C-alpha cells in the first residue's frame, strides 16, 4: 500500500480572505505532499530492513513512519474540516454534544482557542470523539503526532 495526496474539495483561494491562497497551496502541495512522500519512503525502508534482517534499524524507521503518517492524517483532517461554506455555530447532535461536554459553544471556543494558542512550535488542536471515554475532547497534538482514541 502507498499513500496518496488527496485532492481538495475546493480551490486554494476558496478560504480567502481568512487563509491566503498561497498558504493553502504551500501546505497542500509542499508540506502535505512531503508527509505523503515521507510515509511512502519509510514503508519502503522498513520493508528493505526487514528483508535484510536489519532489525536494529526498524525502531527509527517506525518513528519516521509515525511522524509522516501523523502529518498526512492531520492535514487530511484539516482539509475536510475546512469549507468555504462553513462557519457559524453547529446544530443538531454536534451542538448538543458540545453543550454537554463544554457547557456551551462559547465555552468550547474558549477552551479550543486556549489549547491551540498554548502549543509551542508546530502542532494541532483538534476536537475529537474519544471512542474509549465516549465523549468529546480537545486534544493537543505536538509536531505531527497522531491520535488514535
Image (cartoon, grey):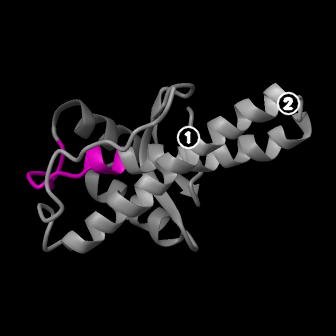
Residue 58: mark: none
Rendered position, 143 above or below 101: below
Residue 125 visible to the viewer? yes
For residue 15, side relative to residue 78 (left or right): left
- Does 80 lie within the magenta span? yes
Q: Residue furthest left?
A: 85
For residue 55, side relative to residue 125 (left or right): right
Identify the residue under disc 1: 40
Residue mark closest to the camera, 1 vs 2: 2
Q: Pointer 1: residues within 10 angstroms few (<14), some, or many (20+)?
A: some
Residue 138 visible to the viewer? no
- Locate residue 68, reporting x and y percent: 57, 49
Residue at 65% across, 42% down: 42
What is the magenta range?
A: 77-90
**Helix, strand or loop under label 1:** helix
Q: CA distance from mark 1 to mark 2?
A: 19 Å
Residue at 80% across, 26% down: 51
Residue 52: mark: 2
Residue at 45% across, 65% down: 116
Residue at 18% across, 61% down: 12
Taken as a whole, is the magenta stretch helix, strand or loop? loop
- Locate residue 47, reporting x and y percent: 71, 30
Q: Pointer 2: residues within 10 angstroms few (<14), some, or many (20+)?
A: few
**Helix, strand or loop under label 2:** helix
Taking depth in this image into account, of 37 and 52 the one nearest to the observer is 52
For residue 72, side relative to residue 57 (left or right): left
Amino acid at each position: 500500500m502507498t499513500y496518496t495526496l488527496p485532492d481538495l474539495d475546493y480551490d486554494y483561494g476558496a478560504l480567502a480572505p481568512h487563509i491566503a491562497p498561497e498558504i493553502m497551496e504551500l501546505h497542500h502541495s509542499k508540506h502535505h505532499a512531503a508527509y505523503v512522500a515521507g510515509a511512502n519512503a519509510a514503508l519502503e525502508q522498513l520493508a528493505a530492513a526487514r528483508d535484510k534482517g536489519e532489525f536494529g534499524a526498524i525502531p527509527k524507521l517506525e518513528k519516521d513512519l509515525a511522524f509522516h503518517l501523523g502529518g498526512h492524517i492531520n492535514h487530511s483532517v484539516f482539509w475536510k474540516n475546512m469549507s468555504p461554506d462553513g462557519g457559524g455555530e453547529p446544530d443538531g447532535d454536534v451542538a448538543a454534544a458540545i453543550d454537554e461536554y463544554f457547557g456551551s459553544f462559547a465555552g468550547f471556543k474558549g477552551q479550543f482557542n486556549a489549547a491551540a494558542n498554548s502549543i509551542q512550535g508546530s502542532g494541532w488542536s483538534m476536537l475529537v470523539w474519544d471512542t474509549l471515554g465516549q465523549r468529546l475532547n480537545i486534544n493537543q497534538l505536538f509536531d505531527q503526532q497522531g491520535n488514535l482514541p
